Image: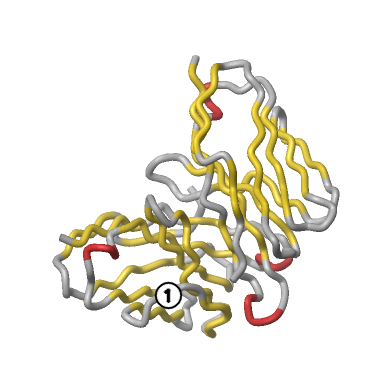
């Protein structure tokens, strides 16, 4: 158990819909990262938050947005869903990844868009 | 855009054989991490290498960071079926607008047959 909790574990939804994925980081970790993992693209960095502020942005689509709340949990919102958005979405948390500290990953949310 | 190229993509070997996985980039990273991911789980950190030329050993696994901090290798001696999994290298940024970002390679799927 990494200490990072992601909900839901599985999500099946239709094209055009909107979903929210939730992540609770490990106690004490200020950084939260979101990643998308698909068979053809591997693990793609989407966005990072540090103590409530956006820190770094990757290949995140405009249809996707995220935020980190005062209690440090984070949500990833995916809207106008397309079939190609089907993937595993991982959240990770860290004390200080830039200092070489470990990023702890949750078990992921498997999103299927039909 | 920083890219990490990992090779080979697939590796299928017999128990007892040795193997090496490579991770190459044209970019310099402040540190490099190796993760292992099993089906249905998030990646789990194996090691972090920070200094150019650094070598770290974890039982039968040997990790090396290139002198220029652009490449790394993972060598497994006498592979066991329990080593089967997806191995991922990830470069860590410690500066600029990408501070704290983890860039992953595409991964190497290792299968060790008894």
Q: Sort mark 1 into few (<14), some (14-19) or many (20+) by Cα contacts within 10 Å.
A: some
Q: How many marks?
A: 1
- Nearer to the camera, B103 or A11: B103
The relative height of residue A26 versus residue A2 in the rendered view (above or below) is below
The colour mode here is secondary structure
Left or right placement of residue B98 versus residue A81 in this view: right
- Nearer to the camera, B59 or B110: B110
- Residue at the spot x=63%, y=48% of the render? B34
Quadrant where the N terminus of chain B is found in the figure: bottom right
State which quadrant residue A108 falls in: bottom left
The relative height of residue B105 versus residue B76 in the rendered view (above or below) is below
Could you tell me residue B78's position as x and y percent? 66, 20
Left or right placement of residue A4 versus residue A97 in this view: left
Could you tell me residue A99's position as x and y percent? 73, 66
The residue singled out by tag 1 in the image is A60
- The single residue placed furthest to the front in the displayed view is B26
The relative height of residue B32 versus residue B95 in the rendered view (above or below) is above
- Residue at the spot x=54%, y=64% of the render? A93
Could you tell me residue B49's position as x and y percent? 76, 51
- Nearer to the camera, A90 or A30: A90
Could you tell me residue B85's position as x and y percent? 49, 35
SS for dot 1 = loop
Chain of the residue where label 1 is placed in the rendered structure: A
- Residue at the spot x=32%, y=61% of the render? A7
- Residue at the spot x=47%, y=62% of the render? A44
């Amino acid at each position: 158990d990494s200490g990072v909790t992601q909900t839901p574990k599985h999500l099946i939804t239709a094209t055009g819909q909107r979903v929210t994925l939730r992540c609770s980081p490990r106690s004490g970790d200020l950084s939260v990262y979101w990643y998308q993992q698909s068979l053809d693209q591997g693990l793609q960095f989407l966005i990072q938050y540090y103590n409530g502020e956006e820190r770094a942005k990757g290949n995140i689509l405009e249809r996707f947005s995220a935020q980190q709340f005062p209690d440090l949990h984070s949500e990833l919102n995916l809207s106008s869903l397309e079939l190609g958005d089907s993937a595993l979405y991982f959240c990770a948390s860290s004390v200080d990844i830039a200092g070489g500290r470990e990023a702890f990953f949750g078990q992921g949310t498997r999103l299927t868009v039909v | 855009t920083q890219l990490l190229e990992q090779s080979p993509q697939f590796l299928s070997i017999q128990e007892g054989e040795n193997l090496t996985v490579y991770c190459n980039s044209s970019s310099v990273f402040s540190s490099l991490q190796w993760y292992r991911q099993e089906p249905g789980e998030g990646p789990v950190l194996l090691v972090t290498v920070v200094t150019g030329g650094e070598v770290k050993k974890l039982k039968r696994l040997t990790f090396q960071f290139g002198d220029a901090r652009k490449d790394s290798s993972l060598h497994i001696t006498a592979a066991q079926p329990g080593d089967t999994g997806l191995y991922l290298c990830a470069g860590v940024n410690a500066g600029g607008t990408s501070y704290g970002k983890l860039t992953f390679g595409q991964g190497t799927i290792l299968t060790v047959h008894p």
